[in-house]
Amino acid sequence: MKKIRNADEILSGGDRSSRRIVLEIADRTLDRLDSYRRMRDIMRMEGSVLHIGNRAWDLSKKRNVYLFGAGKACNHMAMAVDHVLGERLTKGIAIVKVLEETDRFNKTEVFIGGHPLPNEEGHRASRKIIEIVDQSGPDDLFICVISGGSSALMSCPIDGISLQDEIHRCAAEVGCRHL
């Protein structure tokens, strides 16, 4: 099984034959839904032209190409964009929940954000994204990949609200009493 990491534990009890069938179906489904594969299915380069779905951009007319991402599925989405763009990517910033052993990026800096509660690393990455955006111009292209969990991972409270205030607010929302 590629996707279900605790398959042996699940198969250790109950009706093993039925459990195996369900796990195999679930594993194949999860594999087909893999965000890296989905992104690679809709993205491609043809010469200097980037195609995403039915949209296209001539990257030879772009000064910089940036990748920003956050979320629990960001690892694979950002990795796919990073791989498709290759040397055409100026810089990427991905804020993930967990750095996976198989993650391989070329020009993307990866930050381990906090989820369900924001943390300093996610905040630092968010500030870097804002710095890049502030320095950008009309000839720059931004590609953003966002998935569930991004609101905590990519937390950047406005002036007057500290990161600690944001953590306490999020903790109250998720019912966390112990910080």
Image: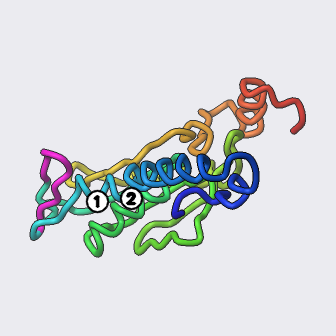
Q: Are discs 2 and 1 less than 8 Å apart at CB?
A: yes
Furthest-right residue in view?
178
Q: Which mark is residue 40?
A: 1
Residue 125's spot in the image, x, y percent?
A: 56, 54
Q: Amino acid at mark 2?
A: Tyr
The quadrant of the rendering that contains the C terminus is top right
Residue 100's spot in the image, x, y percent?
A: 58, 65
Q: Residue at x 13, y 45 (%)?
A: 54
Residue 64's spot in the image, x, y percent?
A: 27, 62
10 Å crowding of disc 1: few (<14), some (14-19), many (20+): some
Q: Amino acid at mark 1?
A: Arg
Can you tell which quarter of the image residue 36 is in?
bottom left
For label 2, the SS is: helix
Q: Residue at x 33, y 69 (%)?
A: 83
10 vs 64, left or right, is right
Depth check, front residue: 39 or 86: 39
Q: Is residue 52 magenta?
A: yes
Q: Is residue 136 above or below residue 171?
A: below
Depth check, front residue: 31 or 153: 31
Q: Is residue 1 magenta?
A: no
The quadrant of the rendering that contains the N terminus is bottom right
In the rendered image, which residue does mark 2 sit on? 36
Depth check, front residue: 139 or 50: 50
> What colour scheme was applied to this rendering of the protein?
rainbow
Q: Which residues are magenta?
A: 48-56
